[in-house]
Image (spheres, rainbow, N blue to C red):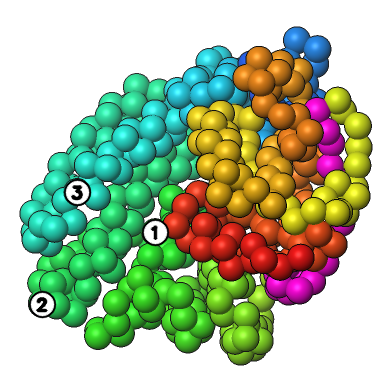
Amino acid sequence: MINHFYKSLFWILIFLFIGCKKIENKSLGAYFRGEIINPSSDNVLLYNDNKIIDTLKLSPDKRFFKKFDSLNYGLFKMEHLPENQMIIIESGDSLLSRANMSDFNGSLFFSGKGAAKNNFLMETYLKLQNEITFLSSKYSLSGNNFNEIIDSLYMEKHVKWKNLIDKYNFSNFTKKITEAAFKYPYANRKARYALIRGKSKNIKADSSYFNYRNKLNYNEEELSFFEPYISYLMSYLSLEAIEDDQIFYKAKNKTDFNIKRIEVIKKRINNIKLKNILARAVAYEEIMNSNNQNSHEKFLDSYSSINPNQEYYNEIISLNNSLMQMRAGRPLPIVMLENNKGQIITSNRAFMGQKTVLYFWSQTQMNHFKRNEERAKMYKEKFPNYRFVGISIQPYNQLVRNYQEIMNIDIKNQLALVNYQTTTNDWVINLLNKGIILDKNCVILEGFGNFGYEKSFENLLKKHYSIN
């Protein structure tokens, strides 16, 4: 009887133990909520592995909500155009974010379960941004002295990170991401220093300079879509590809240099996912260089030899085709635009009849908008035959309409993109300072001007001023 009792107890305990383990191992859900003050669009996009997994519509009180029914862990990107931020969400998190689009980076803050790791990412990013000017002024120092400064800044971040992971008992995944947030930016600084100073004359003789590489991993699949990691690897590729007698800022604009970077990827990067991501990034830099248009086919032959992901390959081919459509002498691709009153108009109808200059701005960067308006006014005084049209990359909202009226801006020469994604692809808008010059028939005279570079852009305006 007693033996039967203990046998029964044994199996009950085993059952409970197994049952508890099942509950413990079961993936919990997670919540992600947020509030956007002064929104520039009506949604927040959520990405994982660089693919949109959800479009979170803003409610009337400017809030959004996402429930994950089952989740182990993940690195996501939240995007409210044109701003974005990487975030970590794991099982059981209930994360709340709050941001003001008038100063997205400065105002973004997280609370709730899972907040500490994400606030650390944001704070680290801001600190690194604040160090840019300081470190740029130190490139004249010797390699040893520059290393000492970087190592000191790195240790400051590392001590804070160590205290944080001890306090919150972060998962191994979160430890990896949060450490990478400062480890790879500082490695990138050292790599960029070597590129700028010239590795043959100043760095190569110092065999210890590249010792920092011993602590890095060149095949971290979990960091594949983490910008600090990819930025460092891109600098690493450049260092491996550049010749001893080459100057980086001249070499980087050459197709042959980008082909060499593809060769380095094939030799040094083993992880297939990373290999594709890095090759895609190199391809973007090559294709976006309009000065290399005559040798893009040569590059694409090299790019295809890496057996790229078909989706990425199609994307690069599409970008190349868009670039070709923006060459001088081609009609400007037709897109949909919105005027200050919310009326939709096609671009060919909007710009037909007068030589037109298009410049771009973002509702989240109003200081940039003011500078562009001042430039447009200055250019207009010198070249009155041109019409200057400012285009917001986001659809209009009432705050912008009110602002333009208060500032007495000529709304007849202000339009907005209706669809950011398709238009930026069609017009190859890769930077806000882009300037496009059209003739009176909406044919492209210059598709890749830099509106913010006054001397260069003024020369383009002079060049085309007498053309009908």
Q: Nearer the viewer, residue 218 or 381?
A: 381
Q: Quadrant of the N terminus?
A: top right
| Residue 110 % position (x, y) | 52, 20
Badge 3 or badge 1: first in the primary sequence: 3
User: Circle 3 sits on which residue?
Assistant: 137
Q: Is residue 215 magenta?
A: no
Instruction: Find residue 78 and report its horizontal and vertical position in percent.
Output: 63, 35
Can you identify the residue that label 1 sits on?
232
Q: Is residue 142 left or right of residue 184?
A: left
The crowding category of the residue bearing disc 2, from other C-alpha atoms within 10 Å (few below 14, some 14 to 19, many at least 20), is few
| Location of residue 124 in the rendering, given as x and y in whole percent from the top left corner | 37, 34
CA gap between label 1 and label 2 equals 22 Å
What residue is shown with label 2? 205
Which residue corresponds to the image point at 34% horizontal and 80% vertical from the top-left?
242
Comparing marks 3 and 2, which lies closer to the viewer?
A: 3
Mark 1 or 2 closer to N-term? 2
Q: Quadrant of residue 440?
A: bottom right
Decide: is 224 above or below 443.
above
**Does the image show residue 257?**
yes
> Magenta residues?
318-340
Q: Cα distance, mark 3 to mark 2?
A: 23 Å
The residue that appears at 38% across and 78% down in the rendered structure is: 251
- Describe the element under mark 1 as helix, strand or loop: helix
User: Horizontally, is 289 left or right of 194 in the view?
Assistant: right
Q: Does 435 sit left or right of 374 as displayed?
A: right
As drawn, the label of residue 58 is: none
